[in-house]
Image (cartoon, coloured by chain):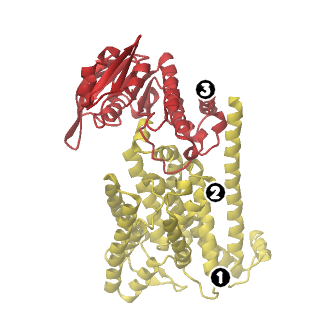
C-alpha cells in the first residue's frame, strides 16, 4: 500500500519534470523566433548557412554580434530577475515581493548612475549604434550591488519587527523606490548631456546595450547564484511553514534569509547595471509558474529560471518588432504587461487560491 | 530520551516569561503542560528545542546540553508541532510530510526518505489524502498531517503546542490516542493542553505553569481543588468516580 503512495508521488514529480522540459522547448522556439525577427531579413536558410560556415559577412555580423548577445542578455536577465523574485517571495513569505516592488532594482539603478556621475565610471560615449557605453562595467556593477544592499537592509530590518505585513513591506519598497528615483533625478540634473543619455537608459531597461563581454560577467555571477538557490531550496521550503517551525527543522533562519536576500540582490544588481530597470519580470514570472506547478520551491526555482528567460526574450522580441523600425526598450513593455497584473493581484486579494 | 531542565529563565523584551523552571522528564513520558493563557507553556516548549535561547539555565538531553548540538543534530532528536501554522502557500499532503525529512536531506530526498514518509502515512491512515492540498483538509486531518510530519523526523522527543485547540472532542481524543501510542513506543511526548480532564486521561506527568513559573508537577495527585483554583483563579469541583477524577467548573 505504501508503494502506491510513492508511485503517486513519483508520478507527480514526473509531471513537474515534463513541465520543465516543455519550458526548455519553449525557450528554444523563442530563441529561433528572436534570431529571425528584425529589420534585416534573416530566415532559416541563412541561419543554417551561417551554422555550416558559409554565411555572408553581413548575416554573420548581424546574428553573431547583434542578435545573439541580445538574446543571451534577455535570457540571462530574465532568469536572474525571475529567480530573484521567486526566492524573495519565499524568503519574506510575501506574494507581492520582487526585486522591482521592493525597490532593489531602483536602488541598483541609482548605484549605477552614482558610479557614472560621481565615481567617474562615466567616460561613456555614444557608441556606434546610438547606445551609450560605459567603460568601467565592474565599478558600475559593484556600485549597483552595494546600493541594492542598502534597500535590502531596510526591508530586512522592517520584516524583523513583528507585524511587518506584506503590505508594509511593499509600502516601504515604494518609499525606497521613490527615494532612489529622486536620487536618479538629481543625478540627471547634475549630469552633462552624454551622461544624461546613459542615465536615462537605466530608468527604462533596454537590452540594446547587450554585448558579449557583459554576457560573460552575467554568466560568472549568475551561475553560482542559481546553484546556491537550488542548494537552499529545502531551506526555503521550510521557511514557508513559518520561522519557528523552520528553526525546529534545524534551519538557521536568519542566515538563510540574509544570504538569500544578498544573492537575490546581487543577481538583480548585475542585470540592472547592464540593462537598466526591467520591471515586473520578478513578480509576474514566479506568479505564473506558481499557478501552473504550485508552490514547491523544489520546482519553482528551476521553472522560474527558465520561464524568466523565455518571458523576457519574448517581450524583447516583441519590443523589437511591434512598431518596427522603432525598437522599444523592453522595460517599457514589461511595465505595460506587469502593472495591470500587479493591480489584479492586489484587487483579487493575495491570500486567495495558491497563496491561501 | 531523558530531558533535564535546569533553572531556565526566559524573557521577551525584558518582561519575564519563564523563571526558575526545573524539571526532569524520562524517556517515554507523556507530559501535559497546563496553565492559563500566557502562563509560559508555548515559551517552555520553544526553550526545550532551542527555538528560543534561554537567558539563564540549560536544557540537557541525556546529559548533553542542547546548545552543544548543531541545529541539524537537534532536529533529528526533537520534532515540533507549532500551535497554529500560518501557511502562506499550499502544498499537498505528501510534500508536507516529506518536509519532516529536511534534517536528513542534502540535495534532494532519497528513496529512503520517500519510504519513511509513505510508511508514516500508512500508519496514520493518510494515504488516501496523499495528493490533496493540505489547506483544504479538515482541522483534524491537518493536525494528523502535522503530527505525521513531526514523526517523519524520526524524533525521540515530540513537542506539541496545543495540537487539539481547534478540534471537536472526538478528534481531540484521536490525536491524543495517536500521541499516546507514540509514548508507548518510547518517544517522549510533551504537549501543551487546555483541557485538564484530557491531560489526566492521557498524560503520566502533568506540569502546571502559572505566570512563568512551575506551579506544581507530578501525577494525578496534583489535581486538587486547591491547585486548580489557584492556577486558574476560578472555583471548581473535583469529582471522584472509581479511579477517575474529573474537574468541573463551579460557581464564581
Provide the chain ID for the residue under circle 2.
Answer: A
Task: Residue at the far front: name it.
Answer: B251
The relative height of residue A190 versus residue B233 in the rendered view (above or below) is below
Q: Residue at x 33, y 78 (%)?
A: A182
User: Which of the labelled discs sits on residue A94, or is there none?
Assistant: none
Provide the chain ID for the residue under circle 3.
Answer: B
Is tag 1's residue or tag 2's residue first in the polypeptide sequence?
A: 2
Provide the chain ID for the residue under circle 1.
Answer: A
Within 10 Å of the Cα at label 1, are there few (<14), some (14-19), or many (20+) other Cα atoms? Answer: some
Q: Which residue is mark 2?
A: A292
Q: Which residue is mark 3?
A: B123
Q: Colour of chain B?
A: red
How much space separates mark 1 and mark 2, taking CA atoms?
A: 29 Å
Point out the frontmost of discs 1 and 2. Answer: 2
Residue B181 rendering spot, x and y as whole percentages: 52, 20
Q: Colour of chain A?
A: yellow
The relative height of residue B227 versus residue B150 in the rendered view (above or below) is above
Residue B66 rendering spot, x and y as whole percentages: 34, 27
Within 10 Å of the Cα at label 3, are there few (<14), some (14-19), or many (20+) other Cα atoms? Answer: few
Same chain for labels 3 and 2? Say yes or no: no
Q: Which residue is mark 1?
A: A321
How much space separates mark 3 and mark 2, taking CA atoms?
A: 32 Å
Q: Residue at x 46, y 70 (%)?
A: A272
Amino acid at each position: 500500500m505504501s508503494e502506491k503512495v510513492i508511485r503517486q508521488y513519483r508520478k507527480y514529480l514526473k509531471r513537474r519534470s515534463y513541465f520543465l522540459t516543455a519550458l526548455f522547448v519553449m525557450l528554444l522556439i523563442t530563441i529561433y523566433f528572436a534570431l529571425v525577427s528584425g529589420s534585416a531579413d534573416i530566415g532559416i536558410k541563412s541561419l543554417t548557412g551561417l551554422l555550416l560556415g558559409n554565411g555572408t559577412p553581413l548575416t554573420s555580423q548581424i546574428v553573431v554580434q547583434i542578435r545573439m548577445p541580445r538574446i543571451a542578455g534577455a535570457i540571462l536577465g530574465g532568469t536572474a530577475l525571475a529567480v530573484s523574485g521567486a526566492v524573495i517571495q519565499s524568503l519574506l513569505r510575501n506574494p507581492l515581493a520582487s526585486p522591482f516592488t521592493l525597490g532593489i532594482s531602483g536602488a541598483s539603478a541609482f548605484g549605477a548612475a552614482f558610479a557614472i556621475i560621481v565615481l567617474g565610471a562615466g567616460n561613456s560615449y555614444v557608441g556606434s549604434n546610438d547606445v551609450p557605453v560605459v567603460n568601467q562595467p565592474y565599478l558600475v556593477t559593484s556600485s549597483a550591488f552595494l546600493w541594492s544592499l542598502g534597500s535590502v537592509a531596510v526591508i530586512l530590518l522592517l520584516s524583523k519587527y513583528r507585524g511587518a505585513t506584506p503590505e508594509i513591506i511593499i509600502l516601504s519598497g515604494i518609499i525606497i523606490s521613490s527615494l532612489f528615483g529622486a536620487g536618479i533625478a538629481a543625478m540627471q540634473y547634475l549630469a552633462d548631456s552624454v551622461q544624461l543619455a546613459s542615465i536615462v537608459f537605466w530608468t527604462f531597461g533596454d537590452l540594446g546595450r547587450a554585448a558579449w563581454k557583459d554576457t560573460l560577467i552575467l554568466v560568472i555571477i549568475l551561475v553560482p547564484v542559481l546553484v546556491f538557490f537550488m542548494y537552499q531550496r529545502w531551506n526555503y521550503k521550510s521557511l514557508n511553514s513559518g520561522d519557528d517551525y523552520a528553526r525546529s527543522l534545524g534551519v538557521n533562519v536568519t542566515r538563510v534569509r540574509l544570504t538569500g536576500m544578498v544573492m537575490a540582490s546581487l543577481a538583480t544588481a548585475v542585470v540592472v547595471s547592464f540593462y537598466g530597470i526591467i520591471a515586473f519580470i520578478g513578480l509576474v514570472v514566479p506568479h505564473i509558474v506558481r499557478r501552473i506547478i504550485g508552490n514547491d520551491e523544489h520546482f519553482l526555482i528551476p521553472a522560474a529560471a527558465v520561464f524568466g528567460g523565455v518571458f523576457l526574450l519574448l517581450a524583447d522580441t516583441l519590443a523589437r518588432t511591434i512598431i518596427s523600425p522603432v525598437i522599444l526598450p523592453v522595460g517599457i513593455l514589461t511595465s505595460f504587461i506587469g502593472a495591470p497584473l500587479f493591480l489584479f493581484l492586489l484587487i483579487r486579494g493575495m491570500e486567495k487560491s495558491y497563496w491561501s | 530520551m531523558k530531558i533535564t531542565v535546569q533553572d531556565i529563565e526566559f524573557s521577551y523584551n525584558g518582561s519575564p516569561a519563564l523563571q526558575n523552571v526545573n524539571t526532569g522528564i524520562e524517556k517515554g513520558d507523556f507530559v501535559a503542560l497546563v496553565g492559563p493563557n500566557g502562563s509560559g507553556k508555548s515559551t517552555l516548549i520553544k526553550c526545550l528545542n532551542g527555538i528560543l535561547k534561554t537567558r539563564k539555565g540549560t536544557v540537557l538531553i541525556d546529559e548533553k546540553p542542547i546548545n552543544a548540538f548543531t541545529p541539524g543534530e537537534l532536529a533529528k532528536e526533537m520534532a515540533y508541532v507549532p500551535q497554529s501554522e500560518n501557511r502562506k502557500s499550499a502544498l499537498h499532503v505528501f510534500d508536507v510530510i516529506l518536509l519532516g525529512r529536511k534534517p536528513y536531506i542534502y540535495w534532494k530526498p532519497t528513496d529512503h526518505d520517500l519510504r519513511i514518509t509513505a510508511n508514516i502515512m500508512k500508519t496514520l491512515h493518510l494515504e488516501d489524502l496523499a495528493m490533496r492540498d493540505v489547506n483544504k483538509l479538515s482541522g483534524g486531518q491537518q493536525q494528523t498531517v502535522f503530527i505525521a510530519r513531526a514523526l517523519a523526523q524520526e524524533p525521540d522527543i515530540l513537542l506539541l503546542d496545543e495540537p487539539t485547540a481547534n478540534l471537536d472532542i472526538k478528534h481531540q481524543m484521536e490525536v491524543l490516542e495517536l500521541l499516546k501510542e507514540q509514548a508507548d513506543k518510547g518517544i517522549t511526548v510533551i504537549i501543551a493542553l487546555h483541557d485538564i480532564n484530557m491531560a489526566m486521561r492521557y498524560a503520566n506527568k502533568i506540569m502546571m505553569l502559572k505566570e512563568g513559573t512551575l506551579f506544581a508537577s507530578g501525577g494525578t495527585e496534583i489535581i486538587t481543588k486547591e491547585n486548580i483554583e489557584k492556577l486558574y483563579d476560578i472555583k471548581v469541583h473535583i469529582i471522584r468516580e472509581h479511579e477517575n477524577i474529573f474537574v468541573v467548573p463551579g460557581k464564581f
